[in-house]
Amino acid sequence: MAERENRRDRREREEAPEFADRLVAINRVSKTVKGGKRFGFAALVVVGDQKGRVGFGKGKAKEVPEAIRKATEQAKRSMVRVPLRDGRTLHHDIEGRHGAGRVVMRQAPEGTGIIAGGPMRAVFEMLGVKDVVSKSLGSQNPYNMIRATIDGLKQEASPRSVAQRRGKKVADILRKPEAAEAEA
């Protein structure tokens, strides 16, 4: 029993400095009861290691800190890995969808920075993307915007993974069409 607790403590210590988190939204909800109103809080948090992993979570509680803690735990459990080009931008342009939310994300040259609206910016910063151009279309709900962004990022494929799937070399995948015609 003590060994299991030590393992868990060690795992928590290792995770703590590794992840950065960003509070995206807090929503205060009230329930009217006989004696007045009861307030609760819902938090939306994005967590990432700024090296290609990101996740989001929501938490609800009677107090704000507890809601944030719950959201952060859920975000750490729902992390996804995204391949980045040169560790700073996307490999290709992507469109993500969730409900009425639609987001368009494009790769950008070095020095562009993160051009994105609120919730999407938080996802890119926690992911470790430095250069990206994105636009949110449709829903302005932060929950749906983040879900659409994560959906799009899940679709991203690196040249290495595409080459492996096709059974080719990375150079064959990245070669320009003109070069292939000239060779043939």
Image (cartoon, grey):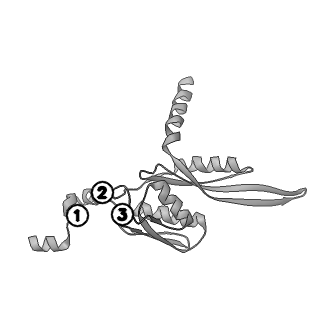
Q: How far apart are the two marked residues, 3 and 1, measured between alpha carbons?
A: 23 Å
Q: How far apart are the two marked residues, 1 and 2, measured between alpha carbons?
A: 10 Å
On the image, numbered disc 3 is attached to which residue?
A: 110
x and y, in percent, of residue 54 in the image: 48, 53
Which of the two discs, 3 and 1, labels the residue nearer the N terminus? Answer: 3
On the image, numbered disc 1 is attached to which residue?
A: 173
Outermost left residue: 184
Which of the two discs, 2 and 3, labels the residue nearer the N terminus? Answer: 3
The tag on residue 120 is none
User: What residue do we see at 73% from left, 49% from top?
Assistant: 63
The tag on residue 161 is 2
Label 3: element kind: loop
Query: In the figure, 159 relative to 135: above or below?
Result: above
x and y, in percent, of residue 158 in the image: 32, 59
Please say whether residue 184 is visible from this viewpoint.
Answer: no
For the residue marked with disc 3, what is the amino acid? Answer: Glu
Label 1: element kind: helix
Q: How far apart are the two marked residues, 2 and 3, measured between alpha carbons?
A: 23 Å
For the residue marked with disc 1, what is the amino acid? Answer: Ile
